[in-house]
């Protein structure tokens, strides 16, 4: 409910005398659906706060006719007419059009063969009515255990919402880690740690086989390939599918993603019919590939462009970068562009950095840690994507990366951005600067690194190497990796005691944020050691 009203409102501002009609099968016309998890959690007090605009507002302020409770059932492209049905009376009529806009959105992706999906207590969450049904179930019955199926954006927000309501929460995900469409596995570990600290039970790499109920038809269990999980409430958060049936029946082209095919003007295969929002496919600005981007932010941009163009304009939509951000309890998690895996799949040879750091000067009160994973093309240095998470300020930094990628920026460009600096707001060198410089050092051959997951795998396999912890004695005492490969040699003693290290062994240096570890790598190489790298992150 973003693209359609936005297109109508923009069209009215562009053309004050046009006849504009919006057909909506529901009773509301402009919902803030992205706020639904926070309404379920109780952080948004009333569903009325999520009603952005009413039919009365559109009529009185914009002279736009809102036909609610009415479904568009067919399009006659030759006659330029839409068949509509009043859902209350069953009356069928036709509306003529010069330009038609399809903003039919998407439907929750619920596997057709999932047994038990009809049980009481099984929900999806896309509309205010869904949220109210969940809240009614929470108050009307003894719900203690909630299972969220799907660890994507909605799944993470819902898990927090159910914990806020005092429920025991489990999350089931078919892929091997949370937020699989957003994060690489090394970054998702941070999110899984946060969830574990908040007592959310995770069942990763498990596909749901069926839902089981009791004799009264209430859901009671979620059965996966490996587990049976007790449940009083189940939320299916498995993504969405574009609603294209109306358009397909009218002969409009549907793309490989399942979304409607549109050009840069957001015209469908019929130039008099435009489409936008969750029902269309978009161009990824890095790869040029067609993708789905079911985001309210994208739908609003589509709506404005369509409203301009149906009234004679020629605005174009450049595509998307897959930008997303989500709150997971006390951390923010964001991504833009391509992940490391996606970069390789798209034919790039990615080089990455993991850069933890404070979100502002460490000595200024309130500094919080964030971690940046930067992905760049090894042949050009172009920034391909990034993932940022932590308790500190994440949103502004992901938006910096959005801008850099949109302008075809390189890691050198990113490293030299003149970002705002003052101790309460930033360090003299932002974490993004550090992340870019690590990639630059790797590209120049000065820095050689290994991922934490690879180190962990080699420890588990019993490989022989030296994991050299160059932190202080106190840091080591507080916490360190328990492995026979690990030993302590503080950075300030490294030059004088380098001779105690085996010259024929592989040495992996490590510290808290990788800065000292990189310094240690350079010191050891200066001392003649040949096989040295540092652990990222």
Image: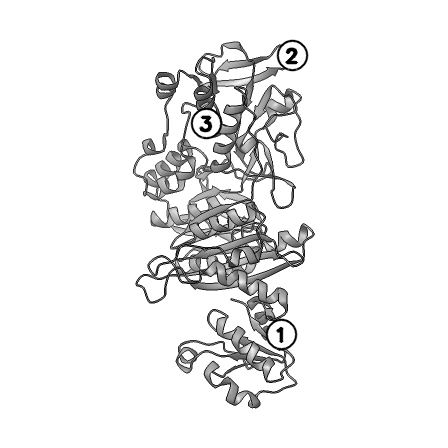
The residue where tag 3 is placed is 6
For residue 210, side relative to residue 368 (left or right):
right
Q: Nearer the viewer, residue 292 or 430?
A: 430
The residue where tag 2 is placed is 78
Q: Residue 16: horizontal and vertical position, in percent?
A: 43, 15
Which secondary structure, mark 1?
loop
Residue 292 appears in the figure: yes
Q: Is residue 57 above or below residue 163?
A: above
Q: Residues within 10 Å of mark 2 (few under 14, many from 20)?
A: few
For residue 365, side relative to residue 101 (left or right):
left
Residue 461's label in the rendered image is 1
Which secondary structure, mark 3?
helix
Which secondary structure, mark 2?
loop
Whole-angstrom CA distance, mark 2 to mark 3, is 27 Å
Q: Which callout, 2 or 3, points to the residue nearer the camera? A: 3
Q: Nearer the viewer, residue 368 or 307?
A: 307
Q: Residue 490: horizontal and vertical position, in percent?
A: 47, 82
For residue 111, side relative to residue 61 (left or right):
right
């Amino acid at each position: 409910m973003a693209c359609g009203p936005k297109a109508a409102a923009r069209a009215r501002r562009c053309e004050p005398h046009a006849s504009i009609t919006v057909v909506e099968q529901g009773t509301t016309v402009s919902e803030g659906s992205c706020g639904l998890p926070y309404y379920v959690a109780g952080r948004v007090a009333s569903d009325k706060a999520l009603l952005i605009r009413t039919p009365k507002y559109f009529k009185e302020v914009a002279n736009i006719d809102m036909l609610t409770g009415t479904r568009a059932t067919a399009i006659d492209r030759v006659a330029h007419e839409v068949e509509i049905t009043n859902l209350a009376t069953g009356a069928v009529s036709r509306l003529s059009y010069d330009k038609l806009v399809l903003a039919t959105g998407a439907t929750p992706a619920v596997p057709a063969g999932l047994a038990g999906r009809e049980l009481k207590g099984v929900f999806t969450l896309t509309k205010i009515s869904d949220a109210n049904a969940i809240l009614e179930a929470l108050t009307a019955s003894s719900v203690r255990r909630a299972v969220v199926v799907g660890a994507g954006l909605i799944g993470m927000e819902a898990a927090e919402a159910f914990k806020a309501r005092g429920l025991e929460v489990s999350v089931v995900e078919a892929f091997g880690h949370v937020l699989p469409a957003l994060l690489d596995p090394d970054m998702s570990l941070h999110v899984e740690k946060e969830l574990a600290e908040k007592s959310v039970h995770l069942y990763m790499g498990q596909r749901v086989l069926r839902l089981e109920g009791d004799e009264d038809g209430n859901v009671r269990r979620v059965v996966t390939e490996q587990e049976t999980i007790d449940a009083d409430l189940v939320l299916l958060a498995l993504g969405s599918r574009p609603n294209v049936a109306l358009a397909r029946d009218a002969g409009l082209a549907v793309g490989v993603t399942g979304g409607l095919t549109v050009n840069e003007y957001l015209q469908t295969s019929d130039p008099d019919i435009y489409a936008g929002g969750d029902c269309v496919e978009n161009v990824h600005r890095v790869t040029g590939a067609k993708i789905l981007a079911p985001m309210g932010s994208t739908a609003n941009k589509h709506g404005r462009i369509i409203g301009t163009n149906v009234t004679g304009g020629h605005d174009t939509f450049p595509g998307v970068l897959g930008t997303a951000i989500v709150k997971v309890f006390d951390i923010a998690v964001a991504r833009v562009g391509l992940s490391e895996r996606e970069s390789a799949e798209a034919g790039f040879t990615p080089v990455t950095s993991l850069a933890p750091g404070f979100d502002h000067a460490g000595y200024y009160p309130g500094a919080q840690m964030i971690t940046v994973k930067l992905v760049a093309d090894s042949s050009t240095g172009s920034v391909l994507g990034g993932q940022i998470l932590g308790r500190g300020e994440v949103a502004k930094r992901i938006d910096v990366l959005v801008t850099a990628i949109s302008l075809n920026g390189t890691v050198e460009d990113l490293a030299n951005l003149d970002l705002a600096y003052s101790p309460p707001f930033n360090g003299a060198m932002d974490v993004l600067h550090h992340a870019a410089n690590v990639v630059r050092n790797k590209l120049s051959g000065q820095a050689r690194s290994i991922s934490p997951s690879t180190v962990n795998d080699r420890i588990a396999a019993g490989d022989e190497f030296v994991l050299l912890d160059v932190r202080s004695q106190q840091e080591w005492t507080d916490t360190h990796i328990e492995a026979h490969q690990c030993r302590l040699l503080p950075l300030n003693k490294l030059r004088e005691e380098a001779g105690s290290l085996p010259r024929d062994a592989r040495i992996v240096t490590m510290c808290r944020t990788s800065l000292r570890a990189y310094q240690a790598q350079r010191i050891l190489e200066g001392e003649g050691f040949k096989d040295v790298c540092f652990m990222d992150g």
